[in-house]
Image: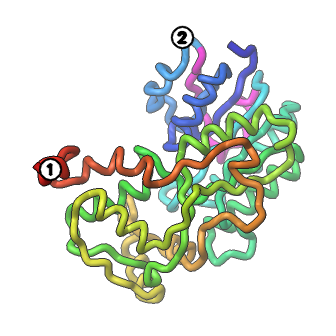
Amino acid sequence: MKNRTVTVIGATGFLGRHAVRALAKAGWRIKAASRHPARGFFLRPMGSVGQIELVKCDVADADSVAAVLKGADAVVNLTGILFEKGQTFEDVQAAGATHVADAAAAAGITALVHVSAIGADRDSESVYARTKAEGEESIRQAVPGAVILRPSIVFGPEDGFFNKFAGMARFLPALPLIGGGKTRFQPVFVGDVATAIVTALDSQAARGRTFELGGPGIYSFRELMEIILKETGRRRALVPVPFGIAMLKAAFLQLLPSPVLTMDQVRLLKKNNIVTAGAPGLLDLGITATSVEAVVPSYLWRYRAKGEYAQDAAQA
């Protein structure tokens, strides 16, 4: 086992669990930090006895961040939110990233990987995208050698995209195509992003660079909905919804405890979410991207009306 410790902030989230598993396999000792460490006991079996320590950390609290970075040789910041409920984009993605950057600089930590998002832009209509850009600036200013990873939509067994719409298709007669379903995405496998994190920590060539992470295929929103319906064996109407109407609906939907859609998400959908031409990506980190078709069927079967063997039964 490496005699090195990495603090993973946001360790209990979707990407966090995969990053912790990959880091443990690579031999790192891990401080798995989150606001609710008691929810992270499932992480411990991913490493050997004592390899993974659960610690409490709130990125909105600078002292809390500084405390979990004590004794660490590296830090991975995965924190981010998709909607504001109790936490704000500013607190988590802008101020939070600043706290991580400042604490790392104060502790002399130069091995820092910060996970942002494709579309991070100071001039964006979306608060999500603007605060992601602010977070990147803080990281780069305080720790110039930090590696910034910008993934497109991340998919995998616990994702919030394919699972979300597959779940909606179980009960709704139609699925909405915001803006006509023309927005393009380049979904990236969560396992590839986790590998990129591990690689970036040890790669001198990656230091100070920004990588945009996307899979091998680019799909329109409509095409992704069609994949979901195909894999779940359901027939549903795909109804185009203009951005203006979507904004009106989102104004009410975002009031739900777990919003299906927010006004900020509608703003995000106005721009494509794909890797910038010529930008460094997975291949530059020595990673061959995994396709949607290779992974998504392995977990969307649970949304079929008759389960995993529904197709086999129909063919028998």
Residue drawn at the location 58% of the way across and 40% of the way down: 10
| Residue 57 belongs to magenta span | yes
Residue that carries the numbered disc 1 in the rendered image: 306
180 sits left or right of 309 in the view:
right
Looking at the image, the residue that sits furthest to the front is 316
Residue drawn at the location 77% of the way across and 61% of the way down: 279
Residue that carries the numbered disc 2 in the rendered image: 49
Is the residue under label 2 in contact with that under label 1 (CB below 8 Å)?
A: no
- Is any atom of residue 247 visible in this view? no
Q: Dividing the image into 4 quarters, which one contains the N terminus? A: top right
Which residue is more in the foreground, 211 or 297? Answer: 297
User: Badge 2, how many Cα within 10 Å: few under 14, some, many 20+?
Assistant: few
Q: Secondary structure at mark 2?
A: loop
Dot label at residue 90: none
Chain part drawn in magenta = 51-70
Name the kind of residue labelled 1 in the image.
Lys
Which residue is more in the foreground, 59 or 3? Answer: 3
Tag 2 or tag 1, which sits nearer the N-term?
A: 2
| Quadrant of res 225 | bottom left
